[in-house]
Image (spheres, helix red, strand yellow):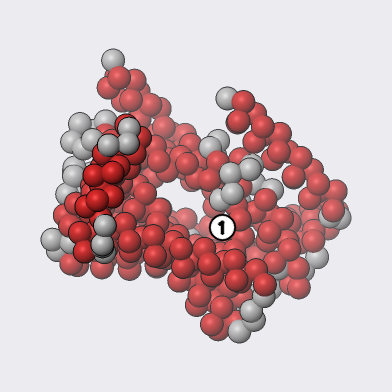
């Protein structure tokens, strides 16, 4: 509870500082006179984004439990609601608990599915970033950090899920060491083993794993294209490759668990990275619209979150 209050205070402070840096009149002008075709295009992106994310979840969990497309949509939206109040999109982890409450998988497998989904997402975001970097052709100091993070996410995903751990020297000894070092480390060892079993189950049909990876990459190209249209809505006009290059950086910065849903930190990053494409007021207006990517699914999830919380309460009883 205290952490949430601190996060709320920091969110208000950061947003207050950003507002003090901009021309309020220009900010309101940008939002009150949007380019409607671009705004409508950006909002329409929510339909395929929610649909594809839900379909991917279906593929991820079909070996563990049955989940209809509509149930998957509701679950995705409910987790987005929790993301509005939890840092670093930790609301996504709730899907692991909800999955456990079906009674068909244990918590470790549920969390493994969610963490695999998140690592695939981060790796896919990295592919979008690398595409923008290659075509944009501008390499800044921040790219060194971003490249390091992207390489880490891709290597971590491959190491945990795709590379058979038994071929790694010392793997058996590591598991034995983890099992003898207390409850927490034993759970880590079990998590690593279960991650391999998860991918083995999915890869019984190689088309499934290919579909998961392809859908994840497509999702993030769609996400960043939506960001492109939000920029153009307020008259900031970076080209698509520039958005592919810089926007993933701002998204990654927004994952730092400082403010609620990255609000303020992410906005400031957009204002800094895209400073060549508009005034601070216009860029702040764009960042406010970009935040709708989190708010709209979160608000829609309010219609479904209660049924999952009720299920959780009943399960605990």
Q: Residue furthest left?
A: 204
Residue drawn at the location 70% of the way across and 66% of the way down: 273
* Residue that extends furthest to the top in the rendered view of this protein: 317
Left or right of 196 in this view: 298: right
Q: Residue 161's spot in the image, x, y percent?
A: 28, 58
Identify the image quadrant of residue 142.
bottom right
Residue at x 59%, y 66% (from the top left corner) = 145
Q: Residue 141: x percent and y percent? A: 67, 72
The quarter of the image holding the C terminus is top left
Residue 274: image x %, image y %?
70, 68
**Is disc 1 placed on a helix, strand or loop?**
helix
Front position in the image: 211 or 282: 211
User: Is residue 72 something that shows in the picture?
Assistant: no
User: Going 64% across and 81% down the picture, which residue do you hit?
Assistant: 138
Q: Which residue is mark 1?
A: 252
Relative horizontal placement of residue 300, taking residue 175 as reference (left or right): right
In which quadrant will I find the N terminus?
top right
The structure residue drawn at horizontal position 52% and vertical position 63%, both measured from the top left corner, is: 149
The image quadrant that residue 168 belongs to is bottom left
How dense is the environment of label 1, judged by Cα within 10 Å: few (below 14), some, or many (20 and up)? some
Image coordinates for residue 306, horizontal then vertical, percent: 40, 27
Number of numbered markers: 1
As rendered, which of 144 and 115 lies closer to the eye?
A: 144
> In this rendering, would 237 be left or right of 4?
right
Rendered image quadrant of residue 33: bottom right
């Amino acid at each position: 509870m205290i952490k949430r209050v601190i996060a709320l205070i920091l969110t208000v402070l950061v947003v207050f500082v950003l507002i003090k840096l901009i021309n309020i009149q220009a900010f309101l002008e940008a939002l009150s006179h949007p380019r409607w075709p671009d705004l409508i295009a950006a909002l329409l992106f929510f339909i395929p984004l929610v649909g594809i994310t839900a379909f991917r979840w279906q593929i991820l969990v079909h070996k563990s439990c049955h989940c209809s497309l509509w149930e998957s949509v509701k679950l995705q939206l409910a987790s987005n609601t929790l993301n509005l109040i939890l840092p670093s999109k930790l609301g996504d982890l709730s899907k692991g608990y909800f999955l456990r409450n079906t009674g068909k998988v244990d918590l470790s497998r549920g969390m493994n599915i969610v963490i695999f989904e998140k690592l695939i997402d981060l790796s896919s975001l990295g592919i979008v970033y690398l595409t923008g970097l290659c075509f944009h052709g501008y390499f800044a100091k921040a790219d060194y950090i971003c490249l390091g993070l992207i390489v880490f996410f891709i290597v971590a995903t491959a190491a945990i899920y795709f590379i058979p751990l038994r071929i790694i020297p010392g793997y058996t000894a590591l598991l034995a060491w983890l099992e003898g070092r207390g409850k927490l480390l034993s759970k880590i060892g079990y998590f690593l083993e279960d991650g391999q079993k998860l991918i083995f189950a999915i890869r019984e049909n190689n088309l499934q794993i290919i579909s998961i990876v392809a859908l994840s990459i497509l999702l993030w190209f769609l996400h960043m294209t939506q960001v492109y249209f939000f920029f153009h809505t307020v008259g900031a006009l970076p080209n698509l490759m520039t958005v592919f290059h810089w926007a993933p950086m701002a998204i990654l910065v927004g994952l730092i668990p400082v403010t609620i849903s990255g609000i303020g930190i992410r906005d400031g990053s957009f204002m800094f990275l895209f400073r060549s494409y508009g005034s601070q007021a216009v860029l702040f207006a764009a960042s406010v619209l970009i935040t709708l990517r989190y708010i709209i699914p979160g608000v829609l999830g309010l219609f479904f979150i209660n049924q999952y919380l009720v299920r959780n309460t009943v399960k605990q009883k």
